[in-house]
Image (cartoon, grey):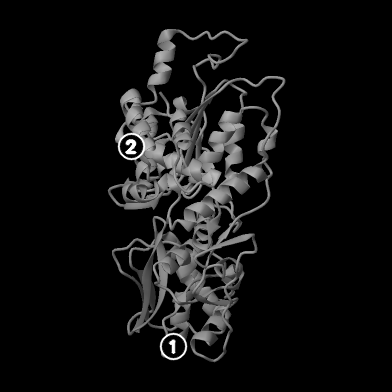
């Protein structure tokens, strides 16, 4: 029995699959076993045609291909190349090194690209489960971004066979680096962009909201903007994406993986994701799901980026309450009869809402026409436990004719990067918004005056333990923006001013 290695996706994580082959005496037949889907079953015809088109004799024996382990559901056309290679080699010796082989075969033996290769190989690389791989030449420009793997690109079945039998030596592709502005911390590069297609200078007035947006970006703190229609809530939310903190190599590769899982071509740009589902979206589309296979949803696709809910109270009550877990734990669990998957979901939650159903409660020129009952129903859609997870709450009023532009996105981004450097120099592994209890005690130390302010706030505003920790995290970010080592009184006061009463 001969075998090569391949892999399949289970959720968004890859599992190694052994491709085993035997040819035994009996009536000629070709069987692929191992809980395979239709794409793999159909590979029999692609493999036959590819072999016969390249002057290989299809063995007149009983051919059996087993994809092990047999209790793992497998899918994808990228198993074609490994199956064809094993059949073509027959009794010939294979280079005994551990090879992963990926590629979809054309009927003429050409090796085609497959969209699943990048997330599969990146997942294997993160687990240290792959060192050498034969892949389609067309995929090298994407795959070579993944470090510590020797990739050998092939265009045809013949090239793959020559490589495995050591008849021909192909130089492996060199790992490529990202060409973006870089900041080094502990010899680890962090990349950022300097292109701002959506600029904060377009927003006139609303200085309090823009300040809150700066703090939210610098520490990845959850933000809720409440204001009249046209006050600039969505404008601020959409511009946040371009001033978020830099990304390291691993985070950029993860962002590219999420783009591929969404069906897009990866950009490999240091730009964090921005997901904005409509308020009519189902719970399955937002959190992920599926009857046989747990698919990733908007919450998972927003990992390391922004999840924006416009018209927040119009989202389903079940969706808003289910959102509490990923906002707190930074991951989402999808449990189905046939699959149980956990996705990372470390996102910045941004929401926008009107102050009342008609939207005119804050207006100085238009009277609100909502009844008390309508107002009560509208407000009751947001529970206190949900609002307790919001770090920054801002009320925005209508703009006036004399309002002017102030800060640009470039200026904001510079302040965010400065705050980011302060956080990294302290040795933080996460940004301020994701600090755990141990890190909170280490990095958010208060002096006697600061502790007195917090004690007074707990009694006056009935702050929960969660609310206190979030106030401390926001105060830590404010201090970082100002370039101050320790949290001062004014930083705590500003952080408390953003709590929803």
Q: Residues within 10 Å of mark 2 (few under 14, many from 20)?
A: few
Quarter of the C terminus within the rendering:
top left
Look at the picture and state if 356 lies above or below 23. above
Q: Position of residue 356 (x, y in %)?
A: 49, 17
Look at the picture and state if 230 lies above or below 165. above
Q: Viewer-proximal residue, 232 or 310?
A: 232
> Which residue is at a point 39% across and 23% down the rendered structure image?
381
Q: Position of residue 259 (x, y in %)?
A: 54, 53
Q: Residues within 10 Å of mark 1 (few under 14, many from 20)?
A: many
Residue annotated with mark 2: 466
Q: Is residue 272 visible?
A: no
Element type where label 1 sits in the image: loop
Q: Viewer-proximal residue, 302 or 98?
A: 302
Question: Which disc number belongs to residue 94?
Answer: 1
Distance Cα–Cα, label 1 vs label 2: 59 Å
* Sequence-first disc among 1 and 2: 1
> Which residue is at a point 34% across and 33% down the rendered structure image?
452
Quarter of the N terminus within the rendering:
bottom left
Look at the picture and state if 422 lies above or below 391. below
């Amino acid at each position: 029995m001969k075998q090569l290695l391949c892999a399949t996706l289970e959720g968004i994580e890859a599992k190694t699959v052994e491709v085993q082959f035997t040819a035994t005496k009996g009536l000629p037949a070709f069987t692929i076993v191992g809980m395979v889907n239709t794409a793999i079953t159909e590979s029999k015809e692609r493999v036959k045609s590819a072999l016969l088109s390249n002057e290989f004799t299809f063995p007149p024996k009983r051919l059996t291909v087993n994809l092990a382990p047999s209790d793992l559901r497998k899918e994808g056309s990228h198993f074609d190349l490994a199956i064809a290679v094993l059949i073509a080699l027959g009794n010939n010796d294979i280079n005994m090194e551990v090879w992963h082989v990926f590629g979809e075969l054309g009927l003429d033996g050409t090796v085609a690209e497959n969209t699943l290769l990048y997330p599969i190989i990146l997942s294997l690389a993160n687990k240290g489960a792959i060192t050498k791989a034969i892949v389609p030449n067309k995929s090298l420009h994407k795959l070579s971004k993944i470090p510590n793997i020797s990739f050998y690109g092939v265009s045809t079945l013949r090239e793959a066979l020559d490589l495995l039998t050591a008849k021909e030596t192909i130089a492996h592709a060199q790992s490529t680096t990202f060409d973006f502005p870089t900041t080094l911390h502990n010899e680890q590069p962090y990349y950022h962009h300097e292109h701002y297609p959506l600029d904060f200078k377009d927003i006139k007035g609303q200085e309090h909201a823009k300040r809150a947006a700066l703090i939210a970006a610098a520490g990845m703190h959850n933000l809720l903007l409440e204001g009249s229609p046209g006050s600039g809530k969505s404008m601020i939310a959409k511009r946040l994406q371009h001033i978020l903190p830099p990304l390291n190599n691993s985070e950029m590769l993860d962002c590219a993986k999420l783009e591929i899982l969404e069906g897009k071509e990866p950009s490999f740009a240091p730009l964090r994701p921005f997901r904005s589902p409509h308020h009519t979206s189902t719970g399955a589309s937002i959190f992920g799901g599926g009857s046989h296979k747990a698919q990733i949803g908007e919450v998972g696709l927003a990992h390391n980026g922004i999840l924006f809910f416009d018209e927040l109270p119009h989202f389903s009550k079940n969706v808003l309450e289910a959102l509490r877990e990923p906002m707190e734990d930074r991951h989402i669990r999808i449990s189905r009869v046939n699959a149980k998957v956990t996705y990372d979901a470390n996102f910045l939650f941004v929401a926008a809402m009107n102050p009342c159903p008609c939207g005119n409660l804050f207006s100085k020129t238009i009277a609100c026409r909502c009844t008390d009952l309508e107002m009560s129903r509208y407000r009751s859609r947001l529970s206190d436990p949900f609002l307790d997870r919001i770090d920054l709450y801002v009320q925005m009023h209508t703009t006036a004719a004399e309002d002017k532009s102030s800060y640009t996105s470039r200026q904001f981004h510079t302040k965010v990067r400065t705050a980011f450097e302060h956080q990294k120099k302290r040795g933080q592994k996460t940004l301020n918004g994701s600090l755990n209890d141990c890190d909170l005690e280490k990095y958010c130390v208060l002096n006697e005056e600061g502790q007195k302010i917090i004690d007074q706030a707990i009694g006056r505003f009935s702050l929960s333990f969660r609310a206190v920790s979030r106030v401390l995290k926001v105060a830590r970010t404010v201090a970082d923006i100002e370039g101050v080592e320790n949290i001062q009184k004014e930083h705590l006061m500003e952080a408390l001013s953003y709590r929803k009463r």
